[in-house]
Image: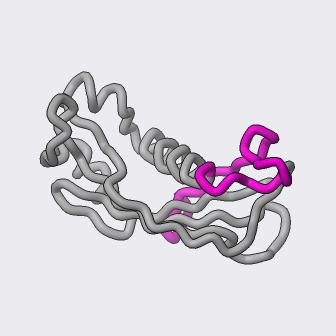
Amino acid sequence: MNELGEFIWPVRVYWEDTDAAGVVYYANYLKFFERARTEWLRSLGIEQQILHARDAKALVVRQASVDYRRPARYGDSLLITSRLVEISQVRLRFEQQIGSRTEDAGCWVTADVEVVCVNALTFKPARMPVWIQQLLEK
C-alpha cells in the first residue's frame, strides 16, 4: 500500500490473456482487477478461504463498470492500482486502474467495482465480520 492508500499489483500480459490479434481480451481485464483486489485483501490478512470457513461469508462482485481507453498487448508489463473509496457494513467500492509499468502513458483501463459481503450458503447480503471492518478502517 502506498502513501495514497493505493495497492499496486504488477501483471505481465501472457498469450493466454489475448485474442487472435495479440490484444488483451476485454473480459480478462476483470480477471486482472480481481487478482489485484484479492492480493490487496491478502496483504491485510484477509483470506477468502478463512472468511468462508470461519464466518460463512464471502465477498462477491455485485457490479462493475469498466472504461477501456487503450489496449494492452501481449508482453506488456502492467500495474493494477486498487483504491478502496467507500466502505459500509455490507459493501466495499473500489476504483481500479490499469496502466503500463514501463511507460508513462496514463491510464489504459479504469473500473468502478462494488463488492458485497454475502452469506456463503444463501448468497444473501450479510454484515461483514467485525474483524474485517476493523482491518479495512485502519
Residue at (76, 48) in percent of width and height:
18
Q: Residue furthest front?
A: 20
Residue at (25, 22) in percent of width and height:
53
Residue 8 counted in the magenta span? yes
Is residue 82 shown left or right of residue 100?
left
Q: Position of residue 112 (x, y in %)?
A: 44, 68
Q: Position of residue 124 (x, y in %)?
A: 15, 43
Quadrant, the C terminus: bottom left
Q: How is the image coloured?
A: one colour
Residue at (69, 52) in percent of width and height:
25
Is residue 20 shown left or right of residue 137?
right
- Along the line of sight, the residue nearer the viewer: 131 or 118: 118
Q: Report the span colored magenta.
A: 1-28
Is residue 6 shown left or right of residue 128?
right
Q: Position of residue 108 (x, y in %)?
A: 69, 70
Q: Main secondary structure of the magenta part?
A: loop
Q: Quadrant of residue 46?
A: top left
Q: Quadrant of residue 2?
A: bottom right
Is residue 58 shown left or right of residue 90?
right
- Along the line of sight, the residue nearer the viewer: 47 or 23: 23
Q: Position of residue 96 (x, y in %)?
A: 52, 64
Residue 118 counted in the magenta span? no
Residue at (39, 38) in percent of width and height:
45
